[in-house]
Amino acid sequence: MALLWDTSLLLRKVKDLRCLTPRRHRVKEKWAATRPKLPPTRLAVHHFDATYSTQLGQLWPSVRLAMLSERKYGALLNNFSHNAVLAELKAQGCVDFISEREREVPSCLEEKSEEPSDVSMKSSDVDGEQLSLSPNIKCLVFPRGDVTRFKPARPDKNSLLGYYLMDAASLLPCLALDVQEGHSVLDLCAAPGGKTLALLQTQAIRFLCINDSSVSRTLRLRKVLHSYVPKQLLTNENLRITSFDGTKWGEIESNTFDRVLVDVPCTTDRHSLMEDDNNIFSKSRTGERRRLPQLQLELLLAGIQAACPGGEILYSTCTLSQNQNLSVVEQAIYQAREKDGIHLQVVDLRPLTRMFGNTFHFAPDLHLGEMVIPHLAANFGPIYMCKLKRLT
């Protein structure tokens, strides 16, 4: 018994018995197989903390909290459906943020400097044309602070759904594009189709070209359109769906379109923070993520070339990243001028922030474009947009 007691004491004093085992007989620990790897969402958090804390400063903690919380949605009304959903949604407390917009700047929105951009002169009244909003686009949202979820849309007698659920801030690029009666429009990176559907709601487009370089995403886009748009319109010769490489569009069809929407692939910040599936921060997609700014630049330049002289181009992303937003626009303006001889003017979108400052939370002091940043009371975005006018 005394021997067993002495042995137990000895074992307690020996912290690692491996030192008593010859090296050739030691078994390697399986730490490489069992140690948990960081998921893409965690990698995204680390990356954003390092990048956006510098970019946004004191705004970042509140933006971070909002992005990690449940986002708000808007219900884009489908004018092609016969379901009377407008009254039903309003009875639930929803409001159409477009028709019931505020025309004055709310006190919480900081006025930006009136100094022109170093890149190109801003103008809220380019060639005397004021920004006008289509009366046919309606999007209902719950009031600030109300996080009620929308119910799934129901099909009508023609199997068309009454509304499309999307981030309401994603509509702002479509509104800023300012489509007018008889315009020809190119949606260069159209999938999954929310912005395309919004453009169709204007019922003013003479010809619409819808493109996405991914065949699988184009198939998804077609499914969305078939759920919301009558078949006779989808087979109309004034609507074309393609799957070309968008970066080559300047070679395919240049100097053609009155309006071009360039809603580029990006890090999709919210998805990167919330979903591990198909996450751009996966280790296998590191190279793809690093190439994004160059791809975005090539797509924007192609969109600029596709626009006719006097036409307008709307560049947008769903990221807070300066490298994917302001830097891409600045490079595109420079390269379009130096390489292609195309001169561009940045259109001031502050009228849009004045109209919708009570619905969305806009980033202050951007010298190029506008950006909706997530906020717990108005948890939409992020959405960056910058509008360019091709000068004659």
Image: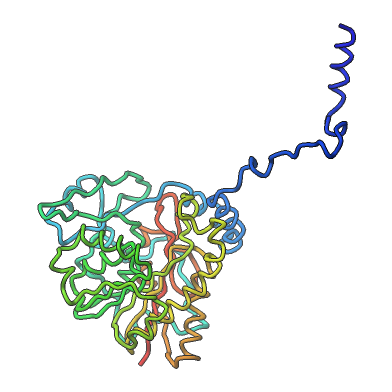
Determine whether 238 is above or below 40 in the image. below
What's the coloring here?
A: rainbow
Residue at screen point 80% across, 36% down: 26
Farthest residue in the left direction?
157
Residue 319 screen position, x and y as percent: 47, 63
Farthest residue in the top direction?
1
Q: How many marks?
A: 0
Residue 260 screen position, x and y as percent: 33, 77
Which quarter of the figure is the C terminus placed in?
bottom left
Does residue 5 show up?
yes
Q: Nearer the viewer, residue 188 or 139?
A: 188
Residue 282 screen position, x and y as percent: 54, 56
Farthest residue in the front direction?
24
Residue 236 screen position, x and y as percent: 16, 73
Q: Which of 339 and 142 is in front in this view?
A: 339
Q: Which image quadrant for residue 216? A: bottom left
Which quarter of the figure is the N terminus placed in?
top right
Residue at screen point 30% across, 73% down: 242
Does residue 66 show up?
no
Determine whether 222 is above or below 386 in the image. above
Residue at screen point 53% across, 57% down: 281
Left/right placement of residue 49 relative to residue 295 reads right
Q: Which image quadrant for residue 314? A: bottom left
Determine whether 189 is above or below 331 in the image. above
